[in-house]
Amino acid sequence: MDLSMYLLDLIVFIGIFSIMSLSLNLEYGFTGLPNFGKVVFFLIGAYSYALLSQAGVPFYICLIVGAIIAAVFGFLISLPALRLRIDYLAIVILTAGEIIRLIVKTEDWIGGGDWGTSVAPAIAISGTSPQVNILINIGLVYACLFICFVISRLLTNSPYGRTMRAIREDEVAAEALGKDRAKYKAQILMLGSAMAGLAGGLYVQYLHYVLPGMFMPIVTFTVWIMVLLGGPANCWGALLGACLVQIFDRGANLAKDLLTLPTDASNLQYILFGVLILLILIYRPQGLLKESAIKTRAINRIRKLKEPENNKGDYK
């Protein structure tokens, strides 16, 4: 096995799933929305990209339209679901995701049904080595990741971000202060779904194919592990969690090829994932990185007023 190809491949997957982790962190970490159907928006973005690219649409339009379609689906799912309690909301989104996946699987006109279909890469230079094409993908993926990260940071360090955290902590109190919790939840689900759709498009154009088996519920739970491991309500934690989980995931695949194990590496991987999440919840429930502090102008002014040097008269 070419180790350089393996490392470049790992870097691409870290970037794609970092976008997924950021999207779930906005929904769950900052707003408290337990989206257990995350993979469905990943699927929608992937199939949107595949169908549009086959029609000859430029790759950047495929990515943008895929994100928009995923956002629309996020909004439609949120309309009935947001009227439910948090636990029922999680069940409804999970069920909706499985229904959409089964529809895609059984309908041959949607990307070839269960057999899937090939997908053209976003950017490919003929006559170059595979390493060069992967490097091009790394540039594309991390440019998209940078945009998503900046949006997440600007949003969470704003008055809107304060409202997100307020809804997470106490919905009734937030609504008593005039905040429409249903509107905010729908908006966050749309934004998170758009990011997941973008990640789905990047995913399938890199793999050059798409089929329903790529979008099983385990993808959702893997993204949840990323967020819980790195630290909910911390954008850097979302990136850290994605990096660690992908290293662990791809490392298990490498171990399967290089080592003789008493059991299948995939089964062992799922067992270790379960043990890992239990250890996190027991010993580090806040994740590896604590929740990031709010950094709006109003909060910064209040903090400066509380500093001893700004209130020297109180210490005479």
Image: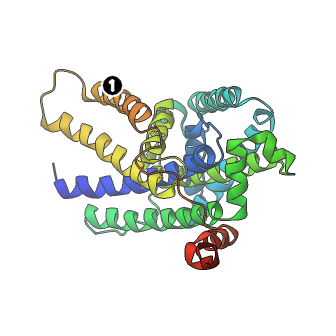
Question: Would you place residue 196 above or below residue 124 in this image?
Answer: above
Query: Where, by quadrant of the figure, is residue 303 drawn?
Result: bottom right
Three-letter amino acid code at the position of disc 1: Ile
For image coordinates 70% across by 26% down, the residue present is 88
Question: What residue did someone put label 1 on?
Answer: 271
For image coordinates 52% across by 46% down, the residue present is 232
For image coordinates 40% across by 35% down, the residue present is 280
| 185 vs 99, nearest the viewer | 185
x then y, percent, for residue 155: 65, 62
Q: Is residue 114 visible?
A: yes
In-image side of 157 versus 83 (left or right):
left
Crowd class of label 1 (few under 14; some 14 to 19; many from 20; radius 10 Å): few
In the picture, the quarter occupied by the C terminus is bottom right
Q: Is residue 58 visible?
A: no
In-image side of 276 versus 115 (left or right):
left
In-image side of 289 versus 2 (left or right):
right
